[in-house]
Amino acid sequence: MKIKTKFFARGVHIPDKKSLSSGCPIRELPAPETVAIALSQHIGKPARPVVTVGDVVEHGTLIAEADGAVSANVFASVSGKVIAIENRPLPRGGTTDCVVIESDGKDSETTLPPLGEITPENIVARIREAGIVGMGGAGFPTAVKMSPKTPVDTLIINGAECEPYLTCDHRLMIEKTDELVDGAKLLAKALGVERIIFAVELNKPDAIAKLDVCEGVLVAELRKRYPMGSEKHLIYSCTGRRVPPGKLPADVGVIVENVATAFAVYEAVRLNKPLCDRVMTVSGEGVNEPANLRVRLGTSYRYLLDACGGETDDAFAYIAGGPMMGATLLSTDFHTRKTDSGLLVLTARQASISAPTACIHCGRCAEVCPMHLLPMDIDFYTLAGDYDGARDRGGALNCIECGTCAYVCPANRALVQSIQMCKQKLRERR
Ligand code: SF4
Ligand code: SF4
């Protein structure tokens, strides 16, 4: 059943470019010869390795265990031998230790033990055991989110997928509808809530139609506007509740989970499958055969691109994630993680990279900012080294890094990078 939705005033309309891959059914990508599985694929402490070089593992073997409450288990995504545990770079900077496994080609699989009775406690324990984290990009361990400190009455499954090009959540919604709804109901049971809302942008009418006939869930048809998928804007659009600055969705009685996370919960509870793979979109005008692929965690980006016919002659920029919030890559020498929803290759024309010029004080960045901030002021104070000014006058700490301001800026100011730097400096000082 559909519900009435609200509409937030700011944000932007952007060409969604989804037709490149929205018609491509999810294709299972064969296991690569080696995988490099990061021990840090989530917010919180990296997982602690429980294997050493030379160990033989199966697809689904625990290779690193959560180190503390805010951390997550990590599993082998192929069967074979551990050939290294080494430090490797991450797409957004920094490094993490990775367990490198050479596949034996057999793909022999092991699963988690049967769950027994499906109680809220057992569901949360299974989510923790299976290493499930927020797969929309945040990577927050899902089991932690299942124990909110305040009472909640609504679960929103985020199927907005407002980033251009990305279609992996869309394909999951139309190809795995029943499994997704089951996963959402398991999450709702764990939380003790009855109201489940699937929030989907209007540019996915087939997904809306399929979800609309499912029992026990509501569907919010969202107008297409970026950044509709941001938690705070999604909650307002679906419930009319506003999450105050510095507060969490649970503070207004809502938990938001991504479509892919709900699917992972279904697989962990019903099929005893730990989180070893995910669906990703490989797209962009610089890819010969855009696709939605089910990929093993730890697969190299190069392997993904080769599986999509490689790049076009005019390929120019590589992006991990979507073009608005993703990370521009200096090489394809990275490996898939739980939070990776896409790999894009853009041509020079699409990437439209120009050198920044001086701010012309047009105010457009502030007009579109969905958080009602002053991005030009944050930029100004940050570049002057006045991080307190950026925080107090621009509102830097409330920025959700959606990139809307940079998208409209006629001077091509690197506003998001400036805001990220400011936040980093304030964090370091704390
Ligand atoms: S200031 Fe932050 S929240 Fe506002 S548009 Fe820019 S990136 Fe988005
Ligand atoms: S949009 Fe760009 S040029 Fe205009 S005020 Fe903002 S930073 Fe300055």
Image: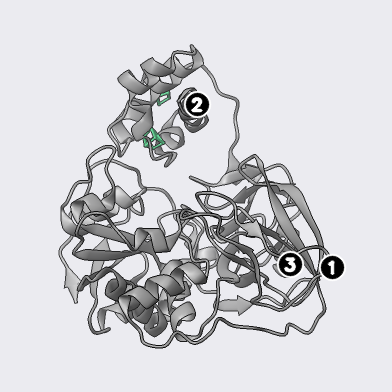
Q: How is the image coloured?
A: one colour
User: In the rendered structure, which disc, 3 or 1, sits on the residue that comes first in sequence?
Assistant: 1
The circle drawn on residue 28 is none
Foreground mark, 3 or 1, reads 1
**Which residue: 70% across, 64% down?**
299
> Residue 194 location, x and y as percent?
20, 73
121 or 197, which lies in front?
121
The residue carrying pointer 1 sits among few (fewer than 14), some (14 to 19) or many (20 or more) residues within 10 Å by Cα, namely: few
Q: Mark 3 to mark 1: distance in Å?
A: 34 Å
Determine whether the residue tagged by mark 2 lies in a helix, strand or loop.
helix
Foreground mark, 1 or 2, reads 1
The circle drawn on residue 418 is 2
168 or 395, which lies in front?
395
Identified by mark 1, the residue type is Gly
Identified by mark 3, the residue type is Gly
Which quadrant of the rendered structure holds the N terminus? bottom left
Foreground mark, 2 or 3, reads 2
Identified by mark 2, the residue type is Ser
Residue on which the image places disc 1:
54
Ligand 1 picture quarter = top left
Q: Is residue 159 visible?
A: no
Q: Is residue 252 visible?
A: yes
Residue on which the image places disc 3:
309
> Residue 345 location, x and y as percent?
65, 53
The residue carrying pointer 2 sits among few (fewer than 14), some (14 to 19) or many (20 or more) residues within 10 Å by Cα, namely: many
Determine whether the residue tagged by mark 3 lies in a helix, strand or loop.
loop
